[in-house]
Image (cartoon, rainbow, N blue to C red):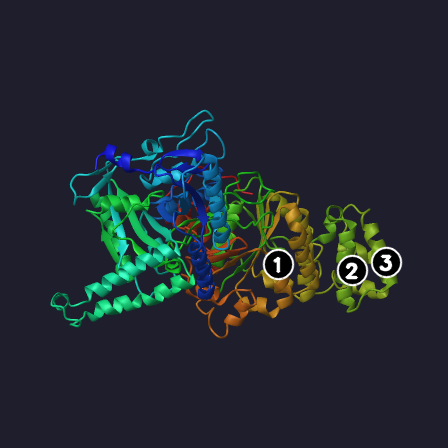
Amino acid sequence: MTSRRFIDVLNWGALVAPGVMACKDGSLLAGWEVAGIDTESMEPDALAGHLWHLGFALSRLSDGETVWSVFERRPWVPDSDPETTGHDALDALTLESRVMLAGEGATWSDRLLLFFCWMPGAPGPLVDTLAGFDEAMQAMESRLRSVFGLQRLMPDGPGVPCPFCGALAGLLGQSRNAPRFGEDDLPVGLDMLLGAEVVQSRRTGPLTLDRRAVAVLALEGLPVTYGIAPFERFQNLPCAFTWSTRYEALSAATARGIVRRRQRFWLQSSADLLANIGGESAGRRDLYGDAMAESLEPVLARLSRGDEGHGYHVSVFLLQGETRAALEPALALLRSAADDGHYGLREERVNAVPALMSALPGHTTVNSRRAVLRAQAMADLMPVRTIWRGHATCPSPRLPAGTPTLLEGRARTGEHVHVNLHNGDVGHTLLFGPTGAGKSVLLGRIAAAWLRYPDAQVIWFDRQRSSAHACAALGGTFIEPGVPGSSGIAPFARLGRLGASWGLSWLTALVEDGLGRPATPDEAAELRGAVESLEKVARPSLRNTWEYVQSRPLRQVLQAWFKGPNAGMFDADEADVGAALDAAALTVIETYSLFDAPPAVTMLSMDYVFAETDRRFDGRPTLVVLDEAWSFFAHPLWVERLRSWLKEGRKLNVAVLMATQSVADASRRTDLTADLLESCQTRLYLPNAEANTREMRPHYDVLSLSPAQIELIARIEPKRELYIVQPNGRRVISLPMGDAALSILGRTGADDSARALKLRAGDPDYWKEDFTNDTGIKLGAPQDAA
């Protein structure tokens, strides 16, 4: 076929309204981008319900109404290079992630489109025709919105790319750009503007499209019985293709006539021709033909009852490449997928051009492969799946508009995914993962990504020093409150910074723990007076309070903290946790020693550390990481503090990331877990092969996970994949991490951490030599360490 002839038969005409095309045969065409059904963690019954509603919507269509469902899979191409921060470790992590995602055949970008073509009953004024088309579109949209999210393909204004025309042009060339129309432009001649040079050198030869090789494949031999969404396997293939499924609706009367003609064909073909010629009333009949004719009786009964609509179904795959050889790997994948599902997949040659035309919206030309199907069968066999891809930018209004997404990942089906902790301005997150599932590395990757936000800070409460090496590489400060030689505790030395109100609350908690009872009104008054007096002291200490109280029980309790085994615990002269928090954008606070201390020491020390942390909530993007978070809920004082962070933190641009390795911890405190699930709209689940066992499943049930989701968590790949759940979507993803990420974040063992703390004391940039040994990459000049 020559270029001229193809343009002649192309049915695209002119835009007669925004996003509406008048075709040459008098029909009107419009399109939508579709947010389809995310089937990954959906219960089978729920999916079947969605497909039933889709089949019902298609059943309402009639003669002159045609729908195309078009699925496009293309290689993912980043919009731009990631911005550099000047920080060696942060930039190395980001660059490695981008390179791994952008590798050839590594990551894909999918799009699901829907087109609707309507043929008016009779010619009339354009205004009336558009009104009728608009009414038909609204009726179809209202029925489909229970299944899909629909976004009309319409330009935002004059002079901007037309997404509707761009989508049509993209079917004939993966690199074709959307045209732009100005206010004074007349958008006519779209066959010439959007068409392509289609050539077939001989009738049985291959097609070329704009001098590129193209393969047209038609699905045939559709299965009589099948499971739910049997063709979804095609949407997982690691190759670029376009899959177009056309449904040309038929009225009951039209469909009944077609079925009866088909029934007569089978009856006639089963008769004994020689017996009929000889005038005999009987003869040997073809039992298969009789059985086929009989099988059409239920179809006629359904049509008579009006239970379900019918229409012509055509399903076509389009592959494009520079050469025929370049198409072979994709052809092999498609054929293999079809064979696995016991479907027929024919590469068209003689029928190539009609098949190509039937794949293009607006063309209802006859295709010899078309078959009459029930509307419900069409719903089952058309591409309906899209995945939740997340927000391309951070959705929090408290960060600058256009702030890049926190992380980029890949779905297990290959699609590019944006990962953010925020849902709106709420970034609180729960992370569940058993020992050895990669929790520490994931926390480090999230913290590193957070530090790329403008003026961001991370405060990380660690356990057993697992983040010591990552902290050094990221230029953070590592402190161990209460451990000699690191950072002690001196709450009253910072009374002027933390305030007398907090000082009185902390002192009261200390005294009441020692007394084993609440303070009396007289004792409370003495404590209040002591704190007021401390405000006048140049460097107040806990020992000073003993000098300002007269009550014998109070003096005995206070004296125990500067005489005896706990002497000096809260009067460490060198201690200044607040200064450590001020020193760097990342501060890691090791809590293992504190939690291993006597309960009173742990409770009072952590209350002070939390107060210093509170002081850092000044509106900057702040991430608070709590490793082994449920251990922080052991005391009512901490619970109230954390509740306040979850409730009020979003107003101060604070996100709390709570991680635990034991899902059982959550199920034991169901009252607390319910509050956390309400506050933490983002939840991350690491693989757990035992999630679906009799012992573990009840614990996951408490987290409001469905059986399908629990099964998913049990089957995802350890140390490579995680399951993210947010109000707007859910997805199994992997975060690309190579040698650079493992060098910076993967040294989490006890020996690695001890080595990190020892080497860093002499050389803050010691980690760069490790990085070079691990990756073969030599980083730039040494950075200043905090």
User: Which quadrant holds the N terminus?
Assistant: top left
The CA span between labels 1 and 3 is 41 Å
For label 1, the crowd category at 10 Å Cα-Cα, with few meaning under 14, some 14 to 19 and many 20 or more, is few
Of the two numbered discs 3 and 2 on the same chain, state the one appearing first in sequence: 2
Does residue 477 appear to the left or right of 384 in the view shown? right
| Residue 154 visible at all | yes
Could you tell me residue 516's position as x and y percent? 77, 69
Examine the rendering and report whether any part of residue 330 can be seen. Answer: no
Amino acid type of the residue that numbered disc 2 sits on in the rendered structure: Thr
**Left or right, residue 31 beside residue 699:** left
Closer to us: mark 1 or mark 3? Answer: 1
* Quadrant location, the C terminus: top right
Q: Is residue 340 left or right of residue 125?
A: left
Q: Position of residue 753 (x, y in %)?
A: 49, 56
User: Which residue carries the number 2 mark?
Assistant: 508
Amino acid on which disc 3 is placed: Glu
As drawn, 413 above or below 94: below
What SS does tag 1 mark? helix
Residue 385: % across, % down: 41, 54
How far is mark 1 from mark 2, CA to CA? 32 Å
Q: Nearer the viewer, residue 254 or 18?
A: 254
The numbered mark at residue 678 is 1
Give the CA distance from mark 3 to mark 2: 10 Å
Residue that carries the numbered disc 3 in the rendered image: 526
Give the residue type at disc 1: Glu
User: Vertically, is 510 above or below 420?
Assistant: below
Disc number lying in front (1 or 2):
1
Disc with the residue nearer the chain's start (1 vs 2): 2
SS at circle 2: helix
Tell whether label 2 touches label 3 (CB within 8 Å).
Answer: no
The image shows residue 421 at horizontal and vertical percentages of 54, 50
Q: Give the crowd class for mark 3: few <14, some 14-19, many >=20 residues within 10 Å.
A: some
